[in-house]
Amino acid sequence: MEFTNQYLKELMDRVVMRNPGEKEFHQAVREVLESLEPVVEIHPEYIEKGVLESIVEPERIIKFRVPWVDDNGKVQVNRGFRVQFNSAIGPYKGGLRFHPSVYEGIIKFLGFEQIFKNSLTGLPIGGGKGGSDFDPKGKSDMEVMRFCQSFMIELSKHIGSYTDIPAGDIGVGSREIGYLFGQYKRSTTRFTGVLTGKGLEYGGSLARTEATGYGLCYFVEAMLNDHGTSFEGKTVVISGSGNVAIYATQKATELGAKVVALSDSDGYIYDKNGIDLSVVKQLKEVERKRIKEYVNFCPDALYFENCKEIWSIKCDIALPCATQNELDKHSALMLVDNGCIAVAEGANMPSTPEAIEVFLKNNILFGPAKAANAGGVATSALEMSQNSIRGYWTFEKVDARLREIMENIYANSSAAAEMYGMKGNLVAGANIAGFLKVANAMLEQGVV
Ligand code: NDP
């Protein structure tokens, strides 16, 4: 899509020029600025007062060396990042990603998206993101611990329970959060809720592990209900087999659907009987094995190399839950041709812009990541609340709040799309609804 508003076009050109080579960040900014065209027509003050120029510029970027010693006694050096993007409505909040593909552009795209996602939750959290190009895959527990400790020695200088509260993301699960928390406590002598996704024994919240996947399904159920249908009896394909994919599979199944496929970066499994989640949990959460091992336990299941082809499976609902740009135009066309009615993003930015165009043109119900996967960070904010009151809530209480938050996100995104003349376009609706609260807070706080 071409910009019609000259200011937005020039701003986008400036973002590309000032952040060379960061294509994921450009992609994320472009999508938001495109959605804001009708907003700036009605509210020129966002342009006049410099809000848009400020919102595309991180408040602070921290970049550091992470040296650690591997099991052979050899020194390894990785890069660490924390992008503190926007604190207009609350302290920076967003996950840490450990994956070899991490560079500044990935962290900036994720941090930028996080601003609007966090705003959509209705909770007081700003946007941030961090990570490293460290690959936990194939490393021993001791290597992961030494890396996490070195990473946190530096990061601890910049975070705090009223400043910046990281959490997990790809490659950062409960094991890594435990090591990171231990080192933070040791470095600062402070036992505070500085990280979320903590273990239940030391300040974690019930339902945080499940939250992103469950929240995704609550969002989809609200979207389907609004169109006279539900998960009941539907066939679902989910990519990935990590935290988000596993708990999306669990909730979709509980809501009456049959999930027939999961993947990892090597390939995908297809089980016509419906995925046996106890096998997946054992393989992925306990043994840290590859998804192809699944067929050794479920003989009716098939394994295929090439994870991208997972979208060729006929399904009613597709939930990409692996990584950015994993679902392209070709995959989107396959889904449409096979009669898919709904797609919702558990991963961050998994659909390319061309794929999203295919979905919107073909009236597929499409839930963008900012809205659909906000359940994880929302529940992290509920973990922060519990840490602040030094108390615990029941699973049922947290889960009920999560469901309510996801239903509100759907309703608010849908209403914003309609109000700005794009009924049914939840990409625009989520961007607008998320933006307005942050932009108004920025206006009220002056030039800071
Ligand atoms: P995990 O590390 O638990 O799992 C990631 C899954 O995605 C694995 O199956 C992994 O396979 C696969 N994957 C990763 N990179 C690639 C790649 N380049 N190509 C194909 N598959 C890949 O991460 P999460 O489940 O936590 O996160 C998944 C997505 O959800 C990410 O986009 C994340 O940003 C997003 N998200 C996560 C939240 C959370 O609470 N955890 C909250 C909101 C969004 P392999 O093992 O082969 O690498």
Image (cartoon, rainbow, N blue to C red):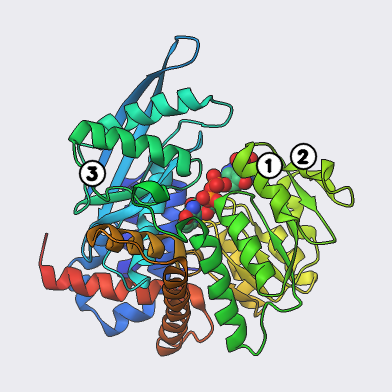
Q: Earlier in the sequence, mark 1 or mark 2?
A: 1
Q: Which residue is mark 1?
A: 283
| Above or below 197: residue 423 | below
Q: Which residue is mark 3?
A: 191
| Above or below 21: residue 258 | below
Q: Which residue is mark 2?
A: 293
Q: Nearer the viewer, residue 180 or 101?
A: 180
Determine the residue positioned at 65% across, 61% down.
Answer: 249
Q: Quadrant of the C terminus?
A: bottom left
List x then y, in percent, for residue 233.
76, 77
Q: Earlier in the sequence, mark 1 or mark 3?
A: 3
Question: Is the CB of mark 1 within 8 Å of ligand 1?
Answer: no
Determine the residue positioned at 48% across, 75% down.
Answer: 403
Identify residue type, mark 3: Phe
Q: Nearer the viewer, mark 3 or mark 2?
A: 3
**Label 1 – label 2 distance at C-alpha:** 8 Å
Classify mark 1: helix, strand or loop: helix
Asked whether the viewer can see residue 109, the reply is: no
List x then y, in percent, for residue 90.
23, 62
Q: On residue 146, which mark appears?
A: none
Left or right side of 238 for 381? left
- The answer to whether mark 3 and mark 2 are in CB contact below 8 A is no
